[in-house]
Amino acid sequence: MSDKTPRGRAKRTLWWLAGLIVALAAILGVGVATGQAQLAPKLALDLEGGTQMVLAPEVTGGQEVSGEQLDQAVEIIRQRVDGSGVSEAEITTQSGRNVVVSLPGIPDQETRELIQASANMEFRPVITMGSFTAMPEDQRTPVEEFPEPTAEPENGSDPNWITPELAAEFEAYDCPAVLGDPNRDPLPTDEAAIVCQPGNEETGQPGVKYIVGPVEVPGTDIAGADYGLANTATGVSTNQWAVNLTFNDAGADAFREVTQRLTPFQDGDPRKQFAIVLDGMVVSAPSSNAVITDGRAQITGNFTEESAAALAEQLKYGALPISFTIESEQQISATLGADQLRLGLIAGLIGLALVAVYSIFQYRLLGLVTMASLVVAGVLTYLAIVLLGWSDNYRLSLAGIAGLIVAIGLTADSFIVYFERIKDELRNGRSLAEAVEYGWLRAKRTVVAAKAVNLLAAVVLYFVAVGNVRGFAFTLGLTAVADLVVVFMFTHPVMQMLANTRFFGGGHKFSGLDPSLLGREPLYQGAGKIREFRPAPAATGQAPKRSQKSSKEAAKRQTIAERRRAEQLAALGGSSAADPAVESAADSGEGSTTSTDRTEEHK
């Protein structure tokens, strides 16, 4: 039978917290053992150094790049680079002409291609398809033997778009050679064109080339894209990865017309397909199996999770009207380096030490609970940062470290609020075990409200800021969540356990719960005892029993209201305002009778 006492609940909560930490550590251990993760957090450009690429923009037709286009390019490249998390890349313009991309570490080829790729996304209907490579010359059909179009094309899927010249070019078109040419001509938007789709080694799909009709839906009409497991009409998962595509109003209308025309074609007919073309290359050519009327389409096929994510990324950040070539590339050292990292860590240790000194001074050994809570919060935050670096490529910058340092004080504030609530309950005459429970009921509302404000501020800052500031906002929000977990699953359960010990429950002078240190002489005397009323020294003419040092310290810890009350009593009765015992006597209302009643009430 489970223990339903506060102590029993505290033990179970602490075990749950231990299980959470062990689970996170085990996941990290698996990642390190398989070589997919590392024990240290990934560092951003300002701390680790990386690669700097200067990109020269290229616009269709050789036109000049406008400032608006360049700004759009910077934003979309930043979204591409940060698409999987905060990678702390720096993307800026140079002389109003080029884009400078600085990435932590050494980017792989996939990242380079993603940065360089034009986002001139187009949706074109497929008219016919053929072999990825060129047909041997001795097998090609002479151009004069191809039939002439019989009429003007009626729509984008009409075969009348194919002229004899285009048909001959299609047979001779060699996709590997064309795709390898960075200076290839852009595709016409209002005519039929030849495009290529490279093969997929993972799925074994061979490369294909197509003759496609004019652009019917531009990439700028894409409102969003994501990926996930496809579901049947009844909501059952098919365990197949799919890409979900959403269009804006104009795109939804255009795509509805396209699917109304393509869907009736028989399976196997190339005209049932539409090609998604990015920078002259087909990234996908799905068939239309239903009329899409709401602007929400789903692309299915032989997707892996990685290929579905890659296609969704290309579609989501595809609406960029210019492409780029890498004009120069160089390795750069850390802009802040080891010295700045060392100074940042020293600043964090100094902040932690100051919090420790304050906690011990203010709360005696109860301050050790604060320090233990900070350690647990630090462990959770560390594991989260390292795991996010593995799963989402999160990199810690100096701004992120600043967020962690700021979080030390914000986290300690939660414990201070809780401890002060406990002391308030002790002043009201409750035992420590009762004060912990009643104080928690009051403190947790304050803590949750404060952390909700911190989290809201971090979220707003993350979405409106760019660059390193986002790293600061991210760590600030992450530590706010960790703080809530620690307060609920560690600090409060530990206090429930300590309340049943003789050292803390008995109000030992080093426990931080000594009655003489609670800001005024309280009714609570430790171990659940309630003091009997004692007349104020001014009334008996006797010297106070407690030491002058304790009296002064108690006076210093009075609240403003208590001091004003003491001053009023001193003015009326001639007693010392610095002596909290006078206030205690006045607060008792009817002298020893009320105090005795409260004593009997607690027996």
Image (cartoon, rainbow, N blue to C red):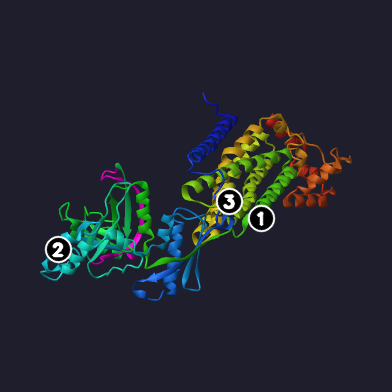
Q: In the depicted view, which residue is nearer to us: 185 or 569? A: 185
Kindly identify which numbered label has been placed on residue 450: 3
Q: Earlier in the sequence, mark 3 or mark 1?
A: 1
Check residue 229 for magenta coloring: yes
* Image quarter of residue 185: bottom left
Please tell me whether mark 3 or mark 1 is closer to you in this view.
1
Q: Is residue 454 left or right of residue 245?
A: right
Residue at the extreme front of the image, as rendered:
138
* Location of residue 488 in the rendering, given as x and y in whole percent from the top left corner: 57, 40
Confirm or deny contact between disc 3 and disc 1 (CB under 8 A).
no
Q: Residue 468: in sight, yes or no?
A: yes
Q: Residue at x 16, y 61 (%)?
A: 140
Q: Amino acid at mark 2?
A: Thr
Q: Is residue 471 left or right of residue 243?
A: right
Viewer-side residue, 602 vs 225: 225
**Label 2, label 3: how far apart the Cα atoms are:** 77 Å
Q: Nearer the viewer, residue 413 or 477?
A: 477
In this image, 95 relative to 299: left or right?
Answer: right
Tell me if residue 27 comes above or below residue 300 in the rendering.
above
Mark 3 and mark 1: Cα distance apart in space:
35 Å
Which residues lie in the magenta part? 214-235
* Residue 341 lies in quadrant: bottom right
The disc at residue 141 is: 2
Are discs 1 and 2 less than 8 Å apart at CB? no
Q: Please name the residue that numbered disc 1 is placed on.
A: 339
Q: Residue 205 location in percent, x, y?
A: 27, 49
The residue lying furthest to the bottom in this view is 64
